[in-house]
């Protein structure tokens, strides 16, 4: 796929995961009644919004590593009963989608850069 397509997929997955984190811990199934401070788990995702919006490769690279924490949290809470378990499964799906999209975006941006700027060989003396 082209870098633009990967970038769009990263944008959609990031916004969906961010919205899920805020809604989950704020209103849908918070850890404690009335909301919990786990709503701040969405903070690292907000730091990535600007770079992802502008299609920056470096942002995709570090976001791919951060995304794994959301996968782990979903796997940890997946066994919880009721809505929490269902939301954890959605979090796993979104985090895997975001991970694949960020890796694909970073890879395609790297190939695009390699094609545009071929490596120059040092002069032979």
Image (spheres, rainbow, N blue to C red):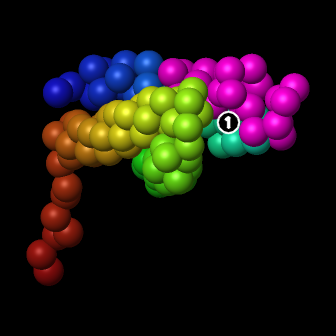
Whether residue 52 is visible here, answered yes or no, is no
Circle count: 1
Q: Who is closer to the viewer here, 53 or 21?
A: 21
- Which residue is located at x 36 percent, y 40 percent? 96
Q: Quadrant of the C terminus?
A: bottom left
Q: Is residue 38 left or right of residue 96?
A: right
Q: Is residue 80 left or right of residue 13?
A: right
Residue 27, magenta (yes or no)? yes
x, y percentage for residue 25? 72, 31
Q: Quadrant of the N terminus?
A: top left
- Which residue is located at x 17 percent, y 40 percent? 115
Which residues, given as a range, are shown in magenta?
Answer: 15-37
According to the picture, the residue beneath numbered tag 1 turns out to be 42
x, y percentage for residue 106? 33, 43
Q: Who is closer to the viewer here, 103 or 54?
A: 103
Which of the 4 quarters of the picture holds residue 22? top right
Could you tell me which secondary element the residue under label 1 belongs to?
helix
């Amino acid at each position: 796929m082209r870098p633009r397509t990967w970038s769009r997929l990263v944008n959609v997955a990031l916004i969906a995961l961010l919205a899920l984190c805020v809604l989950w811990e704020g209103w849908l199934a918070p850890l404690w009644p009335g909301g919990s401070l786990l709503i701040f788990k969405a903070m690292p995702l907000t730091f990535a919004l600007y770079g992802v919006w502008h299609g920056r490769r470096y942002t995709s690279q570090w976001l791919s590593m951060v995304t794994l924490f959301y996968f782990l949290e979903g796997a940890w809470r997946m066994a919880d009963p009721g809505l929490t378990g269902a939301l954890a499964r959605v979090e796993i799906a979104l985090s895997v989608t975001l991970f694949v999209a960020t890796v694909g975006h970073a890879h395609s941006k790297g190939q695009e850069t390699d094609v545009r700027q071929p490596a120059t060989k040092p002069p032979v003396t």
